[in-house]
Amino acid sequence: MDVVTLIWLYILGLVRWLLHEAPLQVINFIRSLPTLIPELLKWLWDFIWFNFKPLAQIIVIPGLAFILLFAMIAVWFERKFLARAMLRIGPYYCGKRSGWLQVIADFLKLFFKEFVIPDDVEKALFLAAPVLLPTIPALAITLIPFDSNWVLFDAGGLSLPVFLAIAGLAPVIPIFAGWAANNKYTIIGSFRTAYLYVSGEIPLVICAAASALLAGSLDLVDIVEAQKPIWFAIPQFIGFLVFFVGLILEAERTPFDVPTAETELVMGWRTEFSGVLFGFTMMAEYVSFLGWTLLFIVLYLGGYLGPSLFGVPLYDHIFWMLLKLAVIVVIVVLIRTVYPRLRLDQTLRLGWNYLMPLALLNLFITIILKWGLMI
Amino acid sequence: MTEPEVKPEVMRISWGPQHPMSGQTRILIDVDGEVVRRIIADIGFTHRGIEKILEKRTFIQGIVPIERMVMADTANIALGYVQAVEEALGIEVPERAKWIRSLICEMGRINSHLYAFGLQVECTGYFPAVFLWTTVDREVLLDLFEKLTGARWSYSFFIPGGVRADLPEGFRDEVKRAVKYLRRRFQDYWDAMVENPLFEMRNRGVGILSREDAIRLGATGPVLRGSGVDMDVRRDEPYAAYGDLDFKVITEKEGDCFARLKVRFHEIEQSLNIMEQIADEIPGGPVRTKVPLFPRSKPGVEALSRVETARGELGVHIFTDGGLKPYRVKINSPTLRNMYVFERLAELDKVLVADLPVILYSIDPWYLDCDR
């Protein structure tokens, strides 16, 4: 048989199937629907039921949505609060009087702006830095326990050192970014960053070590669980204070915003970034602030543990974590309204002469405490 | 300006005009790491030729351009010029006009000092809270200016022979109310900012100018008094009504940025006292003598007037040639002298990059005043 005949036969078969078989099939399908739909829904329900929590954990908390939402709310709150302190009203027109849409509008504006890449920059590094900046603290956030079995990344019982290692990478990026931008202000700013982080991070690590020692574990979940009798903020009061100052220092918030001192260095190592690149660097500030604050809550304020009444802990829930986060954000923003910026040398003196010995003293007290408990 | 050569061990940074805190000037700094080795101010960057403009205007027309020298402090600047014109033309001023002049000058001084205080505080890294506080609080003064002169900023209120208008109805009570309000606000500033330990850390011991250097380099105004030199034209050579008023000249010994800030702060308090005194004791009488619209000068007269503006001593020197216009007006402006001190501070004291804006705004620069 030749090809034309075959095609004709195929078409005839198709027509016959359409006339005789297809209606029957459709009728059968429609008849089986009442049994099929519940099965389909059941399968979908089971899928969501079994996968909802991991999905929520990845997408919502502590995922990208949480970080973006935190950055937005923090920026909005900061703008409104500072405006009050300055006898202004703050964002007013976007999103009614509260101005909540202003942050989104600003983000869209930054996103669609042209970004300028100056001549003589180290292009790859210059473009990579703003992307890496928020990524590294965001990575560290995956290690934070939001509930006893709500940890996104299981570091095998070593989540505290892994957190510190990942977060310790962050200051390298501003240094490279400032150098890559090939500008005098950015170079001064990036070297200030280097000095600042060295003086700030070592006391933080020592304080975190003291907490781990008291809990007897390097796992953040165990550290939280060990705070069931009493939050570590009380037995380690010195460490609590040092860590709080150090966290503001690490996040480059106001008394220590030395590397991006606007009145001195234009915008520090951020000077040459524009458009969406600048938006990313600003977001990085909030992400890093979020990461260190969450660690602070986990180490000293009992993480997801509720306040305990007469030794009986209240319902432990992620809600407590978010509440503690909100309180610390308010305190840190309040600090911005009432304090000027310290000079670089004063910041370093604070780090090496006060934070460092106090952190060591805290470690020493913890060792004695732990020794006493063991006996 | 020709730029001096850059030494190999330093990095030269153009600090301004595109810098958030520089204002409309250009300052070159040679930095070695964080230490500023040399400051070169580009004096003349905003030159507008006000002295030459004044030669092309009649005596009374000249009041408007000279007020543009310092917009925050127009009263004191205009008074310097008007007094020189009065001396050159031989015009007498009634007593009440002198008191009104003093009142407006003190209000202008507070306005200018508020601006300087806010900027110096902002330089230390406060999110511009205090700057906006001062901006809001000076509204009280601007409203008073508006009520009295009809304008909020450059009011051209002083004319040879007196002032343009008498005080409106109930003005003295409003002055007293404003003084009361400002006193309360300044107490807030003092508690929140000046007694803040971190703020003191940023300002104390920064940009120290010793008494000898201040005299040698010709500093003036709060910079000079902040270094412990007791000098104020208002007291030393009384003009307007200052001879009859009771006020103290504020000095501080330290000579650092904090001392200059405190001098300004206490000067505001003294100015408030003066305002109250004037509101209580102002004499009656006419507020202007009749002066022709285009007064003609005698040939070959020289007149010099010195006034204490908010930034320091202003000298206006007028030469006449018998025409309707001055032959030459020479203005010795306070910011020019203080900018010279600012340039030398990098040699006298260790200046860090972080201290540079604080020092610059502690001398209260007004670049248009500096370059005229």
Image (cartoon, rainbow, N blue to C red):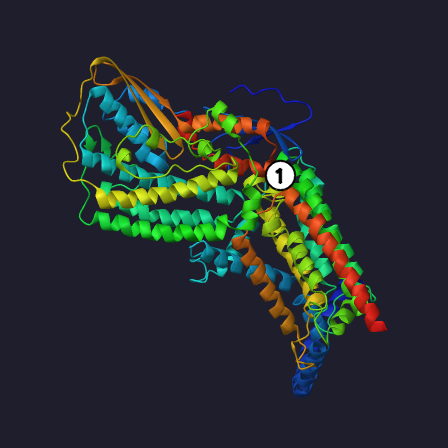
A37 lies above or below B167: below
Q: Dividing the image into 4 quarters, which one contains the C terminus of chain B?
A: top left
Residue furthest to the right: A375
Q: Would residue B189 be found to the left or right of residue A288 on screen?
A: left
Q: Would residue A371 be found to the left or right of residue A181 on screen?
A: right
Check disc 1 and report its element: helix, strand or loop: loop
Quarter of the image where one finds residue A161: bottom right
Quarter of the image where one finds residue B364: top left
The subunit carrying tag 1 is A
What is the number of callouts on the image? 1
Q: Nearer the viewer, residue B260 or A65?
A: B260
- Return the x and y of residue B248 as percentages of the image width and height: 37, 39
- Return the x and y of residue B273 as percentages of the image width and height: 32, 44
Name the kind of residue labelled 1 in the image.
Ile
- Return the x and y of residue A315 as percentages of the image width and height: 66, 80
Task: Give neighbour class at mark 1: few <14, some 14-19, many 20+ (Cα, 10 Å).
Answer: some
Q: Nearer the viewer, residue A255 or B14?
A: A255
Q: Nearer the viewer, residue B115 or A102?
A: B115
- Return the x and y of residue B176 as percentages of the image width and height: 27, 50
Look at mark 1 in the image and give the residue it sits on: A117
B9 lies above or below B132: above
Residue B155: in sight, yes or no?
A: no
Q: Would residue A108 be found to the left or right of residue B60 on screen?
A: right
Quarter of the image where one finds residue A218: bottom right
Residue B361: in sight, yes or no?
A: yes
A297 lies above or below A24: above
Q: Nearer the viewer, residue A28 or B324?
A: B324
